[in-house]
Image (tube, rainbow, N blue to C red):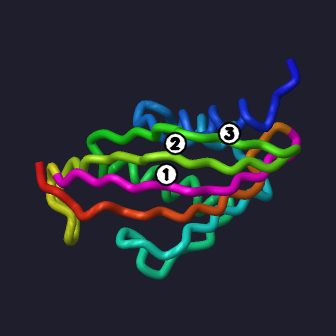
């Protein structure tokens, strides 16, 4: 079955946004040469540039911090192997860690660009705009 850029990107966000998926599930949609660029935001003040291993580690770390998480895609525009995504991410902190207290609810409005190669996510560049944090 042929995969489209849209279907790959939707599957990627499905996995990233659902805490029941595993690191292996995420690895199955990432290209071995994948790069994730996260621009500075309140959760990652210096931003980050991650390769495959760092992305998988970050996925696992996020799962250990959050009690729930979701992505809602509002727009997904594709042109060949490129996609532009407008989405809303929501997460709830599951345990006290650093400045984040259990029950803290977070919402980020996301604009992202994703490149797909060979049916896998090669590049993901994200711009996350967080709403003020609200406790549960």
Left or right relative to 32: residue 104: left
For disc 3, the marked residue is 9
For disc 1, the marked residue is 59
> Pointers 2 and 1 in contact (CB under 8 A)?
yes
- Using the image, tell me which numbered label, if any, was put on residue 23: none
Left or right relative to 127: residue 95: left
Q: Which residues are magenta?
A: 104-118
Residue 100 drawn at (x, y percent): 21, 64
Q: Nearer the viewer, mark 2 or mark 1?
A: 2
Magenta stretch containing residue 45, yes or no? Answer: no
How far, Cα to Cα, is label 1 from label 3? Answer: 16 Å
For disc 2, the marked residue is 16
16 or 97: nearer the viewer? 16
Please tell me whether mark 3 sits on a helix, a strand or a loop.
Answer: helix
At x 18%, y 54%, the residue is 104
How far, Cα to Cα, is label 2 from label 1? Answer: 7 Å
Q: Of marks 1 and 3, which one's residue comes earlier in the chain? A: 3
At x 31%, y 61%, the residue is 131
* Residue 47, above or below 60: below
* Residue 76, above or below 61: above
106 or 28: nearer the viewer? 106
């Amino acid at each position: 079955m042929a995969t489209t850029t849209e279907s790959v990107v939707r599957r990627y966000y499905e996995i990233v946004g659902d805490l029941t998926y595993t690191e292996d599930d995420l690895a199955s949609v990432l290209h071995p040469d994948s790069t994730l660029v996260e621009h500075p935001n309140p959760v990652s003040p210096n931003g980050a540039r991650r390769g495959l291993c760092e992305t998988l580690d970050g996925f696992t770390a996020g799962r250990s911090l959050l009690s729930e998480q979701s992505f809602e895609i509002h727009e997904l525009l594709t042109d060949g192997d490129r996609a532009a995504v407008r989405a809303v991410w929501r997460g709830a902190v599951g345990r006290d860690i650093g400045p984040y207290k259990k029950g803290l609810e977070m919402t980020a409005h996301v604009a992202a660009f994703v490149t797909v190669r060979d049916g896998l996510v090669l590049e993901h560049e994200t711009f996350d705009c967080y709403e003020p944090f609200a406790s549960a």
